[in-house]
Amino acid sequence: MVKLKWKKLLPSGRTTVIGIPFVWLLLFLVFPFAIVFKISFAEMAIARPPFTELFSFAEEKLSVMLNVGNYLFLFKDKLYVYAYLSSLKMAAGATFLALLVGYPIAYGIARAHPGIRNLLLLGIVLPSWTPFLLRIYAWIGILKTNGLVNNLLMKLGLIDTPLHMLHTDFAVFVGIVYAYLPFMVLPLYTNLVKLDESYLEAAADLGAKPWKTFIFVTLPLSKGGIIAGSMLVFIPAVGEFVIPALLGGPDTLMIGKVLWDEFFSNRDWPVASAVAIVMLLLLIIPMMWFHKHQTQEMETV
Amino acid sequence: MIMKRSFYALLAATVAMFLCAAPAAIGKEVLHVYNWSDYMDEGPGGPVSVFEKQTKIDVTYDVFDSNEVLEAKLLAGKSGYDVVFPSTNFIGRQINAGVFQKLDRSKLKNYKHLDKNILRVLEAVDPGNKYSIPYMWGTTGLGYNVKKVQAAFGGNAPVDSWDMIFKPENAAKLKECGLVMLDDPSEILSLTLHYLGLDPNSLDAKDYKEKALPLLNSIRPYIKYFHSSQYINDLANGDICAVIGWSGDILQSRDRADEAGAGVEVAYSIPKEGAGTWFDMIAIPSDADNVDNAHKFLDFLMVPEVIAGITNYVSYPNGNADAFPFIDKEIREDKAIYPSEETMKGLFTMKNMPPKVSRVRTRVWTQLKTGQ
């Protein structure tokens, strides 16, 4: 009897399998968000952890202390608004560059002989087998004053004085485009490879030049891939910290750095949390737009 | 039915695997140390490997390059480290926040070797020396590439004065060969205030915003980058020519340049206006897992021969009085490492700042770096 009751309490195998993604989201998205959200309403303190508790229970009274000052503070100092804007700008620029570089690559692979497509795709993914940090460090060696690029250009006699490339916004763009390129190429490839070639033949039959066919047929048909790839690059690039920290100059201002300063230099976890929450809200808007677009696409298909 | 059962079996096995992962290490004595980068010989034959051989304790040695990173780990709790090395301008507040445990002196047989005068000075941040022991100390001064700097100034570079950095017309001359500063608001802002004749530990926001910032802004266009460890290699390679940095790091850079034999000559100077000085301490977090082993490691680091060996390697003076005879003669007599009585008088210490002043400092620092 007892054994039978036990069985009833346990979820069926099916529920367990379906439940795994939800448990995952709950554990790794909802819980951390709730914790950060909670800290964003606290006040800093010299203690471990270094912030006050929101809830206190004394004399049969539960009191809740919500400090909204952290959010107001973000609007008092123009630094934060500027950092958000500058992050969005950097991420948008890098996404555009990644698209410019990634589209021809994806197109080339999709049009390649089916036998070598997998090999070419492997070539896109292979660099990711080297740790991310190491690949970014490699760019320091390539871009620095007496690095590979400068030495080569000097030897060829194209320049007399080394170009200042490392520790500039240019280096950050290069780093982001390089690091996130696979995330741009893969969704574009899956989209382009499905493209029905009879459309292109039809356009050619009707007298369209190749570039016209590309702009009016291929490009609109690959919109889904462009959006998916752009989102996959844009969203992580906004909050990127490592690439601007290693390749950027001291005047490269991104929200990741501001977050670092609030958390480490100021030890102000509540303000740091507020910065993070606002950043999340900024990212949720493009994500929701992306999601809406995807559902639309699914419906039309 | 069988499938269902095997699914649960698989689930149970997975859970069991995760649960077993941690206790698998039991039976083996371990110790987790978190120290500054380039702060002892990490290779075979270095203090860590000697300690491992002597005690059969397996040491994991990790490094950081800013007090802020260490502090964030300590304040979050359960950092996983058993021995950490915070600086004097941070440790006072950390002790108040309760992140360290009292040292058990009965387990520290070598405590008697520590320098009594230094311990007395350190009571300002750790009353009764209950929570920490001194590791190394040093100054924040001027490191430079002798040939390049002399060339930039036509032979008479003012290397004995902060004028070389803080006067815009001088800093401009260093732009071409590379002027660098620590990425550390407390170090650089304290020094700037001191140079201006103000209190280096000022609590007045105006001093930072209206006095220190304009001066730093005037030399900002000539600064190549702000970083707290990169300059060791760059100075040795000749990629940069002048840096406001930590004494021992610059001297390590000098040694690396000598070893490379590429003709780069690095020197360190404590300018006549005075410089900042600090101690790095050794402490045990209150939630450390291997308290006994941590005490053993602290005791090992107080053995005069051991700590002298570290000083010989890193070029920082230590806080151990009985270690002095074991220190290489050239280091003992190097005025850049052990400053003269007169230089000592000009040194100032950096104090622990209240949160509001900390925020002003960080904000001024961001403004300096980004212009925002």
Image: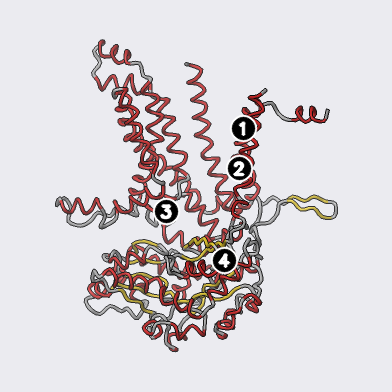
Residue type at mark 1 is Ile
Query: Looking at the picture, do discs 1 and 3 lie on one chain?
Result: yes
Say whether residue B298 is left or right of residue A191: right
Residue type at mark 3 is Ala
**Disc 1 to disc 4, C-alpha distance:** 39 Å
The image quadrant that residue B241 belongs to is: bottom left
**Disc 2 to disc 3, C-alpha distance:** 37 Å
Task: Give residue A20's mark.
Answer: 1
Task: Give residue B83's mark.
Answer: 4
Judged from the image, the secondary structure of the residue bearing numbered disc 4 is: strand
Mark 4 Cα shell of 10 Å, populated few (<14), some (14-19), many (≥20): many
**Disc 3 to disc 4, C-alpha distance:** 28 Å
> Badge 2 is on which residue?
B17
For image coordinates 27% across by 57% down, the residue present is A145
Determine the chain carrying the residue at label 1: A
The front one of A76 and B13 is B13
Q: Percent x, y for residue A210?
A: 25, 20
Residue type at mark 2 is Met
Query: Looking at the picture, do discs 2 and 4 lie on one chain?
Result: yes
> Badge 3 is on which residue?
A245
**Disc 2 to disc 1, C-alpha distance:** 18 Å
